[in-house]
């Protein structure tokens, strides 16, 4: 019987995530595709409305097998770098030939780029239970220069915890960011799971 990783993913709480996604790499796209995974397309569409320069570099954090990169490219975004914990997922992304660079990162080390290196940072389907911790939101927002854009999503599992939406509200209240777009819609329709997509501007 084929292992169903979606049945396991949301039970991971930060430990073992790299191993989970390494093991999932060969069947990831088939499994999420069967469940109608649409969040990358939704996020890319919202982002495209706010990008003035299609050549501006975009960093796709947690790029996985490259589904988010494909969605960004389909919206006319030309320069995309990807980073992920999983070497096996990065191999799948590399085969798509859509990324300028692909880098394996570690959750134990600082992210290997400087503040302001990217005009846009994407974390699509990345932050939440079974994936990256909420603290990554602060790290990535902090890596943007003023005027930079952050596109991300929180699925229903994340939004069950009020801390996720509160993290964005806190930044708005403090004047460090503003929400340009916020759209709740399908995530994995076959499982009746939705997500909220956000376009955030660093102030």
Image: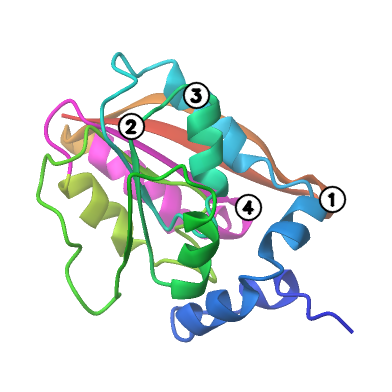
Seen as rendered, the residue at the extreme right is 1
The answer to which of 146 and 167 lies nearer the viewer is: 146
CA neighbours of label 1 inside 10 A, class few (<14), some (14 to 19), many (20+) = few
Task: Name the spot of residue 87 as percent of width and height, x first.
Answer: 44, 73
Between the residue at mark 3 and the residue at mark 1, the CA separation in whole angstroms equals 23 Å
Q: Could you tell which of marks 3 and 4 lies nearer the N-terminus?
A: 3
Quadrant showing the C terminus: top left
Left or right: where 200 falls relative to 10 = left
Measured Cα–Cα span from mark 3 to mark 2:
11 Å
Question: Which residue in the structure is indicated by mark 3?
Answer: 46
Q: Is residue 105 above or below residue 196?
A: below
Seen at 55% across and 53% down, the residue is 159
Q: Which residue is mark 1?
A: 190
Other residues around mark 4 within 10 Å, as few (<14) / some (14–19) / many (≥20): some
Under tag 3, what secondary structure?
helix
Residue drawn where x is 70% and y is 47% of the image? 37
Of pointers 3 and 2, the one earlier in the residue sequence = 3
Q: CA distance from mark 3 to mark 4?
A: 19 Å
Magenta stretch bounds: 144-172
Between marks 2 and 4 in the image, the one whose residue lies nearer the viewer: 2
Nearer the observer: mark 3 or 4; the answer is 3
Q: Is residue 149 magenta?
A: yes
Q: Secondary structure at mark 1?
A: helix
Q: Which residue is mark 2?
A: 200
What residue is drawn where x is 29% and y is 17%?
53
> What residue did someone put label 4 on?
156
């Amino acid at each position: 019987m084929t292992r169903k990783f979606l049945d396991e993913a949301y039970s991971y709480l930060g430990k073992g995530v790299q191993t989970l996604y390494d093991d999932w790499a060969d069947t990831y796209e088939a499994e999420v595709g069967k469940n109608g995974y649409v969040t990358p397309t939704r996020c890319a569409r919202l982002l495209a409305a706010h990008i003035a320069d299609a050549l501006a570099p975009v960093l796709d954090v947690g790029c996985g097998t490259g589904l988010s990169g494909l969605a960004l490219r389909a919206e006319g975004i030309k320069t995309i770098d990807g980073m992920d914990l999983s070497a096996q997922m990065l191999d799948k992304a590399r085969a798509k030939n859509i990324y300028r660079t692909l880098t394996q990162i570690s959750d134990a080390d600082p992210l290997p780029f400087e503040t302001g290196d990217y005009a846009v940072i994407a974390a699509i389907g990345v932050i939440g239970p079974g994936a990256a911790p909420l603290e990554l939101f602060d790290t990535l927002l902090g890596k943007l220069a003023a005027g930079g854009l952050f596109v991300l999503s929180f699925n229903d599992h994340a939004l069950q915890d009020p801390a996720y939406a509160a993290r964005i509200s806190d930044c708005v209240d403090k004047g460090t960011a503003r929400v340009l777009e916020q759209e709740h819609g399908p995530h994995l329709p076959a499982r009746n799971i939705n997500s909220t997509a956000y376009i955030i501007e660093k102030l």
